[in-house]
Image (cartoon, helix red, strand yellow):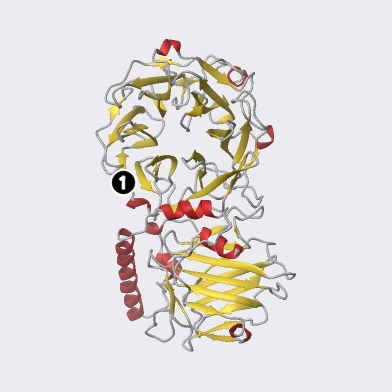
Amino acid sequence: MNDEWGLRDFSQFGVFDEKTSGFTMIKNAILTVVCFLFSLFVFTQNPDPRYIENGYDIHASGYIDQPYIVTLEDGTWLCAFTTGKLEEGLDGQHIAATRSSDLGKTWSPPVALEPASGPAASWAMPYLTDFGRVYVFYVYNGDDISKLDGEKIRNDILGWYCYRFSDDGGLTWSERYRLPMRTTAADRANDWQGRVQIFWGIGKPVTLGEGIIFSFTKLGKYMLDNGEGWFFHCENINSERDPARLKWQLLPDGEHGLRNPEYGSVQEEHNLVPLSDGSLYCVYRTQVGYLIESYSRDGGHTWSLPSPARYADGRPVKTSRACPRIWKCSNGKYLLWFHNHSGDHFSTRNPAWLAGGVEADGEIRWSQPEIFLYGNDLSYESGRFSYPDMVEQNGRHWITETNKLQARIHEVPVEMLEKLWGQFDQIPLAIGRPPVMAFNEEDLKKEKLPITGFPENSEGGFILMNAMRPDGGLTIEMTVQPKDFSHARVLLDTRNEFGSGLYIQTTGYRQLEVNLCNTEYCETWTTDPGLLDIVKPHNVTLIVDNGPDVMMWVVDGKLCDGGTSRQFGWTHYSPFLGRILTNKEEVLRIMPEEMKSLRIYDWAMGVSEAVGRQKN
């Protein structure tokens, strides 16, 4: 469920019942208010580094997008972004830059590179040369086009590709220069027959030889149709100080940009990284539900036919119509920001996920992903975040993001990066804390196992989890071999006589299903269809993470992603689910012949940890 907690009708949780007595209704109303106030308290006190409001503010306005950073020679960060007092695409949209000398904690007043009163200027991408000059490349509506067929239009993705530069760290800026963008087939097919070009960019320039290359998306039809990837290469920008002598080349060669007709009209927001052998790797978004990748082995002149990017296990990487960003880190490994579901629209950009990448046989393979950022606001208007950038300094990494009203920057926990990249290593991954319950082979021959290590419930039994606590959660590690997958064969059960508790059962098409229940309703999620069978034992981990309120399954080293049968492999649950209990007998009921190993943790294990333990 993806509704916004703050706007929920509590009646769906069984708090209000018109058939109850007046006393009960008053009691339940008081309880609801207490729960709501408590939720506000715990949410504002959330210490989780993944919680979006724990980041440092960069800038806030009616609109703020693509906060991209370069690190100056003295360690100062210079952040260029697109902003305006009104919403995206409306009058006053322009680019600006701000500086931070304390690793993003505070920022200087923004300096406008183009005035808010002028034509739209958007999608700033900074680059720092070897000699300390900062270039910012951006889309500028130099002809001030505002109508199409007599109708007023959004005009921030058309016009000229321009740049300005600064030799004093972004305090002052040069005059405007225009890049020589040749007209191609996509331009001639557009609504203006090439007299106006439609395009935008979301990446940053990367090193190619002694120069740079950066990607952008051309459109063949207004608005957001027939997208294809293009690249500007400059071979001498790191040595030449005279803008008139910069050598620009538009790639790929020929009339057509990077795209695969099989993936439809929406092929956009291309960005790229260099590989260790000098090849280039580009990814972009579509509406087909997958991250699309392509390689160039000749400096961007030609590209492989785009196809889905893949995890190391061979599965395609899902992402929605949201900005996927890739970065190459100083250790030669890679990071991918994406949203881990196959939606074909602009919604559901919360949470954001990271995967780690390594090169194998000249290509990048991606780790199983982790949730990197989440927020409590799940609304379309202000609860989505995207268009990130990464800055690396002295072995630390930070990532920016924006919900288009506010831009923030967040440090990436070192442990998260080590574990993402560590999935490719053969050594076991360390886990945060040991299990509170672990049963040996002899124990698992019994139908009932003693429950220990959890806080006591005042009404009897234990509290396995309190969904109201953002720093809490639950992990269940199992090795199971069901004898059949008939519906509702219960493998594990903690429920009390009122139905409150947790149970896991078989269901669907060779699936396991977890039910987290209070006395009124249950939150339910299953493994992906077809992953399990009766032939061999399977390592299965259930992760219930109270931070982002997400349930997910890891099966045989693979995080469930929904496969081809559903959009999501994970699901949100309500924090108002409350406490998940055990029965008063304090026993865990299991199916002994089918449970081969069992460990239970009173915290939410990371995906990398679950993958690492299942491999070892």
> Quarter holding the C terminus?
bottom right
The residue under label 1 is 56
Report the front residue among 484 and 265.
484
Residue extending furthest toward the top = 244
**Residue 221 seen in the current view:** no
Q: Position of residue 406 (x, y in %)?
A: 34, 42
| Location of residue 83 with respect to 2 vertically, above or below | above
Residue extending furthest toward the right = 535
Q: Position of residue 237 (x, y in %)?
A: 44, 19
Q: Residue at x 57, y 76 (%)?
A: 598
Q: Position of residue 109 (x, y in %)?
A: 24, 33
**Residue 294 seen in the current view:** yes
**Horizontal arrangement in the rendering, residue 506 relative to residue 130 (left or right):** right
Q: Quadrant of residue 511?
A: bottom right
Q: Secondary structure at mark 1?
A: strand
Q: Quadrant of residue 169?
A: top left
Q: Position of residue 140 (x, y in %)?
A: 42, 21
| Location of residue 449 with respect to 157 vertically, above or below | below
Report the front residue among 272 and 421.
421
| Location of residue 107 with respect to 171 vertically, above or below | below
10 Å crowding of disc 1: few (<14), some (14-19), many (20+): some
Q: Residue at x 40, y 41 (%)?
A: 392
Q: Amino acid at mark 1?
A: Tyr
How many numbered marks does the figure carry?
Answer: 1
| Location of residue 442 with respect to 510 vertically, above or below | below
**Horizontal arrangement in the rendering, residue 452 relative to residue 447 (left or right):** left
